[in-house]
Amino acid sequence: MNYFQSSTGGNPALIRPGYELNGTPHSTAYASSSFIGPATAGAMIDTSYQGFLNSLFEWNALNPAGGYYDAELQLIPMIVASGNWWQP
């Protein structure tokens, strides 16, 4: 989370679709909900990320994914972050 928050300046739209181990993005052409969605759940690990978590959640809410895979990776973390995940 430190890397995502610092490398994007807290702007979720700057999270890229894949990274090398050294932090170099695979592509800088677009933001990917399949990465931004899971980062939303990751930002829940500490209250110091609350502002970033809010930004991530808002980005996801305003930019719904079109494809099945991306949509699932976006929706499930939003359910968790909103407190609507339940144990069956």
Image (tube, grey):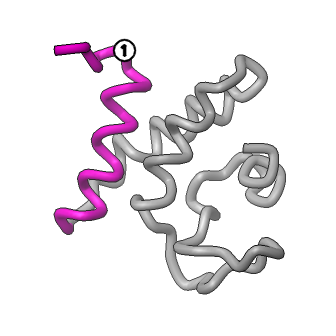
Amino acid type of the residue tagged 1 in the rendering: Gly
85 magenta-colored: yes
In the image, residue 3 sits, relative to residue 1, either above or below, namely below
Q: Nearer the viewer, residue 71 or 30?
A: 71
Q: Look at 78% across and 72% down and name the residue there.
A: 23
Q: Look at 44% across and 48% down and name the residue there.
A: 37
In the image, residue 78 sits, relative to residue 74, either above or below, namely above
Quadrant, the N terminus: top right
- The spot of residue 6 in percent (x, y) is 83, 51
Residue at the disc numbered 1: 83
Magenta residues span 67-88
- The spot of residue 47 in percent (x, y) is 71, 17
Badge 1 marks a residue whose secondary structure is loop
Q: Look at 46% across and 37% down and name the residue there.
A: 58
5 magenta-colored: no
Q: Look at 66% across and 51% down and name the residue there.
A: 11
Quadrant, the C terminus: top left
- The spot of residue 26 in percent (x, y) is 62, 85
